[in-house]
Amino acid sequence: MTQLVVLPHVENCPDGAVIDAEEGKSICENLLENGIELEHACEMSCACTTCHVIVREGFNSLDPAEEEEEDLLDKAWGLEPNSRLGCQALVRSTPLVVEIPKYSINMAKEGHRK
């Protein structure tokens, strides 16, 4: 297991979290399995940007993004050099610190709280 730290997010994880992530699974899968709701409108098929995360620590331990992911990230709200799609970034043995951006491209999600 690898430590995955989630920085506080007003809706998805107000207090932040530290979880034991399973190596070989995506950041998105690990968050969802630990009760942290990360949008994934395309069901983790690398077809949207709703699972966009910013990797604050451990970014260089991730496999490089494929061209398809890079193209989609160009459309993500709040894009940063260390942005990844949570569905494509696989957890390895290096601990990660991730931030869920305040907004996603999917502004009309079901159950959205103000």
Image (cartoon, helix red, strand yellow):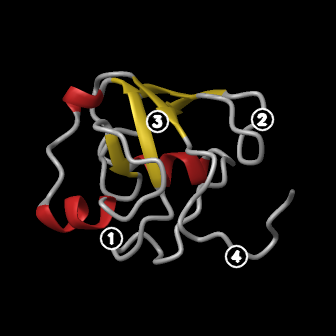
Position above or below: 53 against 67? above
Q: Which mark is residue 108?
A: 4
Q: Is residue 97 left or right of residue 59?
A: right
Looking at the rendered image, the disc whose residue lies closer to the viewer, 2 or 4, is: 4
Q: Is residue 80 left or right of residue 105?
A: left
Distance Cα–Cα, label 4 vs label 1: 19 Å
Looking at the rendered image, the disc whose residue lies closer to the viewer, 3 or 2, is: 2
Element under label 4? loop
The amino acid marked with disc number 1 is: Cys
Distance Cα–Cα, label 2 vs label 4: 20 Å
Q: Which mark is residue 46?
A: 1
Element under label 3? strand
Residue 8 position, x and y percent, is 68, 30
Dot 1 or dot 3: first in sequence order is 3
Position above or below: 100 against 59? below
Q: Quadrant of the N terminus?
A: top left
Dot 2 or dot 1: first in sequence order is 2
Residue visible at 35% across and 76% down? 47
Q: Which mark is residue 14?
A: 2
Distance Cα–Cα, label 3 vs label 2: 19 Å
Position above or below: 25 against 14? below
Element under label 1? loop
Q: Pointer 4: residues within 10 angstroms few (<14), some, or many (20+)?
A: few
